[in-house]
Image (cartoon, helix red, strand yellow):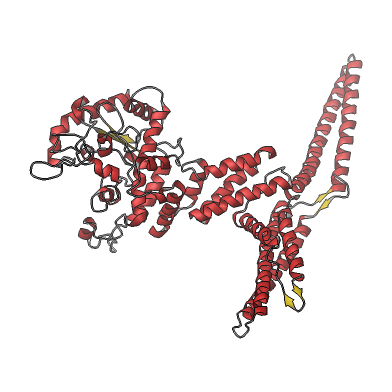
């Protein structure tokens, strides 16, 4: 620090405000100029080949004007950052250094005096009164030295505050340098375009692509508040900007809301720009950008929660779901897709995202907002046309359209990912035993085995024939375990303790027919019918073709088998009244499951 250094926050802030006002004025002038240019080139009375060349020239000038405004927005943001960085205290280098020098001198002087007093106390120990006086004076000098040490700390803190401000502001405005350079290159090139009485725009000029790229990066930095990582050089910063801009443009293309992308910016500002050593910045931003494309990763969840669509309208919630379908690749999936196609989608979900994670509840809430609209009520809270609501007559209470189909099919992907999570979390045991270990762990008490398994006991002629691969162990019944709000995440377990998951590579016909699926509803009620049960029915025809076909018995040639009275042999769930024949076996299996979890 030099004695000539002087920082007056009030003066700096005043200069910044004046600069901002001037920039706003310049920005307004560029808009006015652009409007006048538009009026001129839109004059229908002016038409000629030469005028077409002039139009191109004017369009180029408009591009430059727009780029200047982007640069102005950036510079205004930097001035505001400078204003917030300088604090409120005047930092006078001369005063600070002299204060430090004085404090150090007094510390040395008092330390020397304390030392001499202690020596005198030892030398004249025989004279008790004098020795005690010298010891007391030594303590006093120690106290005075400590006071000046605290004064020195205050002066040193002020010096450090100056350096902190210097480090925090030294790179301000530098990001706009390359944009300004391309603007100047554009103006220089455009100034040479008028030759021999006509305009000859250079359409191959390098500034055209470069300026567009620079402005894109600048706009991303300004809109989302991207911070420059600490201690990186200009070359690394340029590459970092490019990586961030490319990812932001991808997120925008996928349909992310501004709030979601701002959460991404906040995440990288905190976890990369503010922490990572300069040599690892580009590696870490690449990792983070990839994580934004992995459903359930830390950064993805922060982006997801920042977009509070489920608390808004149905249309906004559908926008959020469309984005999710694009990120996962579900936007390329339909009822004709294969199990392999759907399994690949599961790779877009973080393998560490557990079945009880609150993300799944948030997703379910988004689906409910998008596709279920409860009946309106009057002043007394009585529903209008309750009978129609119960019957599902309201058209908005349906998962219709292509998006509805994809959201429905995604249930099987989620269920497969959750089954794989449990299987991969533990080394030994059956699927059922591994699930029990999971539920026994702290924080996983939000489950039940009491939900009806009727829809997962499909057979022909009420148990006469079960699908191939059906387990007849433990009474030949399956049980259903649901977690995460005691409903959302679902596991169907057969008598051998194996999960029945539609997308398993070794899925039997029984697994395809009686498989688990994630539940968007919160409980087994009318909303469950709307969001989960009805879309799997014949009316919608959303189900994967390979699953729909598995519902029928086939001969060795792959042809459907017909009964003697001409009906196709199809596996159907037992009627509610017929569940009594399975009741005892189901109860035994449920109780045995409960006991093992509680052991």
Q: In the displayed structure, would residue 35 be above or below residue 80?
A: below
Please report the residue visible at 73 percent of the width from the left and 68 percent of the height from the top: 22
Q: Is residue 573 among what the camera can see?
A: yes
Q: Name the residue located 51 percent from the left edge and 52 percent from the top edge.
A: 260
Q: Position of residue 79 (x, y in %)?
A: 71, 58
Residue 384: name its quadrant: bottom left
**Residue 484 visible in rendering:** no
Which residue is at the front of the view, 407 or 527?
407
Q: Residue at the far top: name it.
A: 126
| Residue 108 position in % (x across, y down) | 89, 31
- The one nearer the camera, 390 or 88, is 390
Residue 8, relative to residue 593: is it above or below?
A: below
Q: Residue at x 31, y 32 (%)?
A: 499
Compare residues 68 and 38 and report the one nearer the observer.
38
Tell me: residue 311, above or below residue 65. Answer: above
Viewer-side residue, 240 vs 114: 240
Q: In this view, does 487 lie to the left or right of 11?
A: left
Q: Position of residue 425 (x, y in %)?
A: 42, 28
Q: On the picture, is 301 further left or further right than 446?
A: right
């Amino acid at each position: 620090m030099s004695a000539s250094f002087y920082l007056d926050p009030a003066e700096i802030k005043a200069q910044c405000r004046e600069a901002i006002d001037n920039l706003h004025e310049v920005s307004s002038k560029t808009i006015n100029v652009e409007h006048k240019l538009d009026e001129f080139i839109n004059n229908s009375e002016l038409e000629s080949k030469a005028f077409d060349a002039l139009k191109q020239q004017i369009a180029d000038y408009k591009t430059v004007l727009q780029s200047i405004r982007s640069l102005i927005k950036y510079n205004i943001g930097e001035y505001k950052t400078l204003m917030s960085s300088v604090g409120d205290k005047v930092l006078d280098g001369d005063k600070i250094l002299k204060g430090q020098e004085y404090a150090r001198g007094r510390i040395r002087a008092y330390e020397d005096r304390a030392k001499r007093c202690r020596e005198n106390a030892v030398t004249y120990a025989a004279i008790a009164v004098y020795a005690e006086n010298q010891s007391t004076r030594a303590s006093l000098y120690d106290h005075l030295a400590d006071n000046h040490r605290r004064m020195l700390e205050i002066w040193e803190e002020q010096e450090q505050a100056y350096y902190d401000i210097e480090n925090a502001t030294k790179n301000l405005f530098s990001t706009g340098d390359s944009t300004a350079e391309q603007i100047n290159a554009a103006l220089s090139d455009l100034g040479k375009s008028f030759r021999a009485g006509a305009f000859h725009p250079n359409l191959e000029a390098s500034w055209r692509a470069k300026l567009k790229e620079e402005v894109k990066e600048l706009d991303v930095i300004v809109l989302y508040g991207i911070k420059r990582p600490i201690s990186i050089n200009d070359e690394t910063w340029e590459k970092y900007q490019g990586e961030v801009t490319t990812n932001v443009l991808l997120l925008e293309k996928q349909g992310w809301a501004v709030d979601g992308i701002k959460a991404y910016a906040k995440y990288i500002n905190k976890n990369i720009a503010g922490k990572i050593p300069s040599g690892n910045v580009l590696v870490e931003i690449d990792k983070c950008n990839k994580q934004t494309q992995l459903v359930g990763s830390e950064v993805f969840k922060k982006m997801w929660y920042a977009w509070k669509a489920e608390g808004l309208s149905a249309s906004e919630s559908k926008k959020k779901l469309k984005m999710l379908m694009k990120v996962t690749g579900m936007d390329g999936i339909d009822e004709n897709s294969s199990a392999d196609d759907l399994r690949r989608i599961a790779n877009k979900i973080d393998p560490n995202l557990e079945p009880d994670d609150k993300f799944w509840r948030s997703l379910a809430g988004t689906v409910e907002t998008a596709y279920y609209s409860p009946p309106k009520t009057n002043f007394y809270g009585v529903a209008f046309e309750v009978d129609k609501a119960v019957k599902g007559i309201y058209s908005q209470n349906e998962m219709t359209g292509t998006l509805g189909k994809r959201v429905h099919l995604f249930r099987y992907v989620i269920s497969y990912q959750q089954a794989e999570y449990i299987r991969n979390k533990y080394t030994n045991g059956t699927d059922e035993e591994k699930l029990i270990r999971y539920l026994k762990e702290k924080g996983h008490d939000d489950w039940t085995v009491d939900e009806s398994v009727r829809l997962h006991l499909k057979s022909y002629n009420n148990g006469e024939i079960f699908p191939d691969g059906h387990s007849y162990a433990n009474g030949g019944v399956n049980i259903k375990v649901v977690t995460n709000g005691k409903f959302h995440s679902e596991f169907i377990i057969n008598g051998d303790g194996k999960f029945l998951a539609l997308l398993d590579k070794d899925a039997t016909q029984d697994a395809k027919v009686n498989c688990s699926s994630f539940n968007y509803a919160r409980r087994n009620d009318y909303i469950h019918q709307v969001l989960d049960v009805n879309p799997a029915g014949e009316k919608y025809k959303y189900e994967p073709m390979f699953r729909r076909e598995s519902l029928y018995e086939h001969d060795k040639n792959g042809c459907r088998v017909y009964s003697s009275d001409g009906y196709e042999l199809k596996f159907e769930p037992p009627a509610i009244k017929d569940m009594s024949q399975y009741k005892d076996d189901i109860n035994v299996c449920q109780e045995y499951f409960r006991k093992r979890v509680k052991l």
